[in-house]
Amino acid sequence: MTSILERTTASDYLFALLFIVGLPLVLLTVRMFDLRARRKLAAARTAFVRQVGGSEYFEDSPVRPSFGYFPFHRPDSPYTHYSYAVEFQRSGYDVLLYEENLHKGFCVKVQVRIPNCPELWMEPQHFEFLRPPRRLIAIQPPGRRKFLLATADEHFARMVVDEEVAELIYQHRIKGEFSETVLEHGTARADVRGERLEGQQEVLPDVARLIAFLRALPPRTWDYAKDHR
């Protein structure tokens, strides 16, 4: 009976040698690409913060943005709801762009500071969070497909989303420019394009659209908010 050593061929030794030498090289190459991507991301973010004249925040930083509401963040958790955030001013509004680190990847959201008002979800997507006293309301502009609102204050919802605002939402929606938009706890929140907050120029048009949408809301929106604090 031949031994294991006798059955081992030169090709087996060569394969083992290539594996021992090659694996560290592969790992080193992956590490180098990762470092290069991180440096590129950091440089893009630095340029973006400089461009908008803002301040940046990291999840492990003790300093927090001056505003922001994160409904899915536990108050007793030592971790922030974002992995990275930038706060700046745009057209007279305080703006917070932030990157969420989800289990399946990243997404970018924007919040704009507004007066406190009753909670209102327009085109809600996360129905699992819309529990009582919130209720769904169907809005159908004349000649248009209906869409949904969610709120605990139906009078406020119907006052805010009048025919003009409903038509505006419809026009943005058919262009693929309207996502779930939420007014709550002194903020207006919406999604923006991109999976990472890399300083892409497309985020600023999304911010501008949210601000323009807020400006289009009836003035009585904020009067109602003052009377129902």
Image: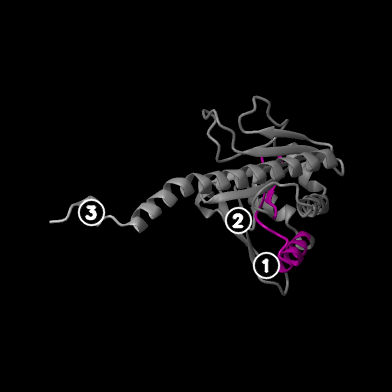
Find the residue positioned furthest to the right: 91
What is the x, y in percent for residue 192? 70, 53
Numbered circle sitting on residue 124: 2
Of marks 2 and 1, the one in the foreground: 2
Residue beneath disc 1: 140
Can residue 118 be seen here? The reply is no
Percent x, y of residue 98: 68, 42
Q: Earlier in the sequence, mark 2 or mark 3?
A: 3
Q: Between 87 and 188, which is closer to the camera in this rendering?
A: 87
Residues 75 and 135: in front is 75
Count neighbours of disc 3 (C-alpha within 10 A) and say few if under 14, some if 14 to 19, many if 20 or more: few
- The residue located at (77%, 62%) in the rendering is 168
Q: Nearer the viewer, mark 2 or mark 3?
A: 3
The percent coordinates of residue 70 (x first, y second) are 61, 39
Q: Secondary structure at mark 3?
A: helix
Q: CA distance from mark 2 to mark 3?
A: 70 Å
Residue 78 - label: none
Q: In this view of the protein, can residue 144 be seen by the observer?
A: yes
Give the residue number, with chain letter if any, for mark 3: 6
Disc 3 from disc 1: Cα separation = 82 Å
Quadrant housing residue 179: bottom right
User: Which contiguous range is marked in magenta?
Assistant: 165-193
Of badges 3 and 1, nearer the viewer stands: 3
Residue at x 64% of width, y 58% of height: 123
